Every structure is written in structure tokens, then in C-alpha cells.
């Protein structure tokens, strides 16, 4: 049975933060409503979803106001609200599909005899036609996201909350997840709340749009009323609004320059003796952007890691030019971490995989300090990047308390702090609102025009287009 979600003057502050993540959130979502929850990066959208799902622990922070599910405190209603997160790879708990779908039911104490039928029904509802014994690791990104949705559906929640469920998916995966969600809510009648920057994907499904701002709800109504009547205003604040695209940078200031990095007959692999893509021939020149595109699971990220010198080539070679290598040998995988810092910088697909410091400021300072820079120079570089990436207000915060979009900008800043000549960025615009997207793309264009080479792995078709990138298709 669909549930009601209610927040009245609700606010949340993480234990290590001075600033409230959400303030004065006031709204009621009636049973069966389909709501798109929008807002700028860092406005608290994900925090709200986590709160309704009952996964914010009391010792993690401080709450004000009230939040209820069907009129009862959230803590007493766990299992009535299902949450699907943005990263498909972090949601599979068990190694087999059937076991993974059953995991949530086991925690709710569902009788074993009932589980099998629920697993079958959930997989059917999301259109995931694979054996129960299929390895979860063998699924594509779109399949993993549908698996996560099936696990939630099997618990028979009254509300389904989706936190950027298509953020890291290719176009086919986006359609798979969208269609699975539509089938699910039509079959179950569950209340649906979606946090998503790709608003156009969901507009024909939702019936209501709620927009969060710094001081609570700033817009609430039908999609037509909110996005059409207030589109320009919301777009200026960072909300992705169809028909109001962010400003893109201009064309490159000059033609590509000297060769910096070259791959020849390159095959790439995460696991030894198991190549996932290739062979490739690819040259990377100063002053250009290469957009690595292709479907989920094709090997794009593995190619990026190999070009970065972080994993070895399975076969073939990656060789740096004398200009880039300097006194180091030509194979970047043989370089020390210190040698990589100023030559090839990398932003991984998952921000949390490369966060190591206790504060945002210290995270950006890690690289410059490793190079032995003086504290005055370190401080100047850090201050510049904090301002440029809109992170100055969270400089003293723990990186793990930032939103996904803020964490992405932080990892970009930490990489840029050592000013590497070649930049390899995996999904650099993930989790960004319209304003921060434009600023990140503009920054990448500036680096291109300053003679840096950029290799951008992305599912965001607008990024290569905006940067006038040379596309390199993997897995077509």
C-alpha cells in the first residue's frame, strides 16, 4: 500500500558540519504521487531521501522539525520506504542475482517460502531476465540498477525513492531503468520520489515537482507550472530545466599541439589475462580534448586508468613523449606517484575512492605538499581552487559529508592542484547542477586552451560537444 511522506520544518546537520544540509523542508507527498525532487548541488536532496528511508543514524547528526511516514516516526517505518542509490556498483550486496534480491526481505524477516515468489515477481517487474545464479558482477550498469530496484521492490515498500538512478549510465541503460521504474509504479501504485539532474527523462512519469533551495522549498507544483513558468529563474539557480541549457565555452583557441601520450595496439584489463577492450591506437596531444564514449561495461574506465599509468597495459603499449616524460622512462605505469603528479592527473569515476584527507582544504593540498611546495604556495593554490569550484564554504568540512556533486568537484580540484600536463577525468560532470556543470566544463576548456591535454570518459553527450572534443568510441 502506498504511503504518505511528510516533512514539517525539517532540518538536518551532519555531526562534523556547522552548516545545515537541509533547512525548513516543509511538504506533504500523498500516497501514490510521483514527485521529481530538484535543487542545486548541495541543496540537501539526497539527505532528504536518506532521512525518509531511515538510514540517517541519530549519532550522525542533528535533526529539527518533524518527518513522518504514514503519520508515524520514520524509525518505526523502516522497510516501508525503499531507496535506490546513484551508483550501480555499490548496491549489489551478494554475488548472485537471486540472493541479492532476497537480501532486503531477509532483513525484514519475510518467510523463506514467500521469498522465491517475490524474487521472481520483482525481477519480472523490472524486466531483468537473468538466472537467479547469475553473477551480479557480470551485469551491465543498467542491469545492476534494475537489480537494485528489484531488491527494493521485493520488500514491497509503500514508497520508492531514487537518488540519481541514471547518473552513470549510457543511453540504453537510462531507458532500461526509466522503463523499469514506470512498470514498477504502475503495478504497485507506490509513492515515487526521484532526485535526478536529467529532468527530461522523467517528466512524462511524474505529476509534481518540488524544488529545494538554501532555506527550504522554493517551488512546488505541476511540472508545467514549475518548469515552464519559473524555468529561467530556476535554471539561473542551477536547476536543470529543459529548454534552458547551460552556457557552453567557445571553440578551441588553437589547433592541437605536440604529442604527449600514445597508445599502440593497446589492450586493457582490470584482471590479468582477462582483457576487456582493445586493441586501440590512440594519440593524445597538447591543447585537445578526447571524449571516450561508449556503452556501460565496454572498458572505457579501464582504458582511462591504463592511460593514466595506474594499471599496466594487458598488451601493446602506452608511451609518453620525451616532452611529457622528461627524465622519467616512457611507460607511465613505471613512474612513481610523485612523477605522475605533475605529468598525468586522474579523477576516478567514484569520488570516494580517492578521498584521503580529513578536510576539504587538506584534500586539495595533498598533491602540492607531496611535491614539497612551500605552505604559502600551497595555500594560494588551494584558495584559488576552493573559490573556482564553489567549495570555499565547506573548506573545513569532512569530504565524506559533502554531496556527490561537491565530492566530484573536490576530486577535480585535488587533481588540478599539481597542474599536470595530461588530465584523465572519468565522469567529471557527474552530480552537477546546471551552474556547476557549466563552470566545470568552462574550466576544462581553459585548461585545453592553456596547452593541457584532457581525456574525458563520459556518458554525458553534452560534455564532448561543449568541449569540441575528438570522440573515441569504445565497444561500439
Image (cartoon, helix red, strand yellow):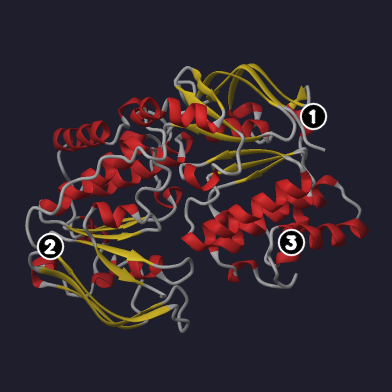
Q: Quadrant of the C terminus?
A: bottom left
Disc number for residue 286: 2
Between the residue at mark 2 and the residue at mark 3, the CA separation in whole angstroms equals 48 Å
Pinpoint residue 29: horizontal percent, then vertical percent.
67, 27
Judge whether residue 296 can be spotted in this image.
yes
Q: Nearer the viewer, mark 1 or mark 3?
A: 3
Q: Nearer the viewer, residue 1 or 102?
A: 1
Q: Nearer the viewer, mark 2 or mark 3?
A: 3
Pinpoint residue 410: horizontal percent, then vertical percent.
34, 41
Pinpoint residue 9: horizontal percent, then vertical percent.
60, 14
Query: What element does badge 3 sit on?
Result: helix
* Left or right side of 10 for 468: left
Query: What element does badge 1 sit on?
Result: helix
- Whether residues under marks 2 and 3 lie with C-beta atoms below 8 angstroms apart, the answer is no
Quarter of the figure with residue 243: top left
Mark sitting earlier along the chain (1/3): 1
* Residue at image coords 80%, 63%: 120
- Label 3 neighbourhood size at 10 Å, few (<14), some (14-19), many (20+)? many
Quarter of the figure with residue 424: bottom left
Q: How many marks?
A: 3
Between the residue at mark 1 and the residue at mark 3, the CA separation in whole angstroms equals 28 Å
Query: What element does badge 2 sit on?
Result: loop
* Left or right side of 69 for 432: left
Q: Nearer the viewer, residue 46 or 305?
A: 46
Q: Which residue is mark 3?
A: 123
Q: Which residue is mark 1?
A: 76
Between the residue at mark 1 and the residue at mark 2, the CA separation in whole angstroms equals 58 Å
Judge whether residue 364 can be spotted in this image.
no
Does 131 appear above or below 142? below
Disc number for residue 327: none
Does 387 appear above or below 290? above
- Label 1 neighbourhood size at 10 Å, few (<14), some (14-19), many (20+)? few
Amino acid at each position: 500500500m502506498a504511503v504518505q511522506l511528510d516533512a514539517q520544518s525539517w532540518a538536518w546537520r551532519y555531526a562534523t558540519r556547522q552548516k545545515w544540509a537541509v533547512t525548513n523542508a516543509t511538504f506533504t507527498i500523498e500516497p501514490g504521487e510521483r514527485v521529481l525532487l530538484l535543487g542545486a548541488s548541495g541543496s540537501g536532496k539526497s539527505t532528504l531521501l536518506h532521512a525518509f528511508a531511515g538510514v540517517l543514524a541519530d549519532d550522525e547528526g542533528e535533526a529539527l522539525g518533524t518527518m513522518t511516514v504514514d503519520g508515524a516516526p520514520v524509525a518505526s517505518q523502516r522497510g516501508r520506504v525503499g531507496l535506490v542509490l546513484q551508483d550501480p556498483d555499490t548496491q549489489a550486496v551478494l554475488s548472485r542475482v537471486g540472493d541479492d534480491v532476497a537480501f532486503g526481505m531477509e532483513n525484514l524477516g519475510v518467510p523463506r517460502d514467500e521469498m522465491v515468489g517475490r524474487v521472481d515477481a520483482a525481477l519480472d517487474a523490472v524486466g531483468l531476465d537473468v538466472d537467479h545464479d547469475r553473477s551480479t558482477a557480470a551485469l551491465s550498469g543498467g542491469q545492476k540498477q534494475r537489480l537494485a530496484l528489484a531488491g527494493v521492490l521485493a520488500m514491497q515498500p509503500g514508497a520508492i525513492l531514487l537518488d540519481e538512478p541514471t547518473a552513470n549510465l549510457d543511453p540504453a541503460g537510462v531507458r532500461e531503468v526509466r522503463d523499469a521504474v514506470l512498470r514498477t509504479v504502475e503495478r504497485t501504485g507506490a509513492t515515487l520520489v526521484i532526485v535526478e539532474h536529467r529532468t527530461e527523462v522523467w517528466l512524462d512519469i511524474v505529476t509534481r515537482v518540488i524544488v529545494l533551495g538554501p532555506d527550504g522549498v522554493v517551488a512546488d507544483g505541476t511540472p508545467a507550472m514549475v518548469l515552464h513558468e519559473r524555468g529561467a529563474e530556476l535554471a539561473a539557480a542551477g536547476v536543470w530545466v529543459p529548454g534552458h541549457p547551460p552556457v557552453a565555452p567557445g571553440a578551441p583557441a588553437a589547433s592541437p599541439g605536440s604529442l604527449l601520450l600514445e597508445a599502440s595496439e593497446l589492450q586493457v584489463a582490470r584482471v590479468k589475462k582477462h582483457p576487456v577492450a582493445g586493441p586501440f591506437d590512440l594519440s593524445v596531444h597538447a591543447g585537445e580534448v578526447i571524449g571516450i564514449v561508449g556503452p556501460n561495461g565496454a572498458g572505457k574506465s579501464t582504458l582511462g586508468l591504463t592511460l593514466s599509468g595506474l594499471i599496466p597495459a594487458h598488451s601493446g603499449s602506452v608511451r609518453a613523449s620525451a616532452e611529457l616524460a622528461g627524465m622519467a622512462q616512457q611507460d607511465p605505469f613505471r613512474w612513481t606517484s610523485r612523477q605522475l603528479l605533475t605529468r598525468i592527473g586522474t579523477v576516478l569515476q567514484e569520488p570516494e575512492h580517492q578521498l584521503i584527507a580529513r578536510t576539504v582544504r587538506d584534500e586539495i593540498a595533498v598533491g602540492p605538499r607531496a611535491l614539497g611546495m612551500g605552505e604559502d604556495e600551497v595555500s594560494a593554490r588551494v584558495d584559488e581552487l576552493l573559490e573556482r569550484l564553489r567549495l570555499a564554504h565547506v573548506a573545513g568540512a569532512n569530504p565524506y559529508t559533502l554531496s556527490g556533486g561537491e565530492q566530484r568537484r573536490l576530486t577535480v580540484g585535488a587533481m588540478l592542484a599539481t597542474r599536470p600536463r595530461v588530465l584523465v577525468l572519468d565522469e567529471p560532470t557527474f552530480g552537477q547542477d546546471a551552474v556547476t556543470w557549466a563552470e566545470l566544463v568552462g574550466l576544462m576548456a581553459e585548461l585545453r586552451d592553456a596547452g593541457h591535454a584532457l581525456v574525458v570518459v563520459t556518458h554525458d553527450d553534452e560534455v564532448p560537444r561543449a568541449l569540441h572534443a575528438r570522440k573515441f568510441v569504445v565497444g561500439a
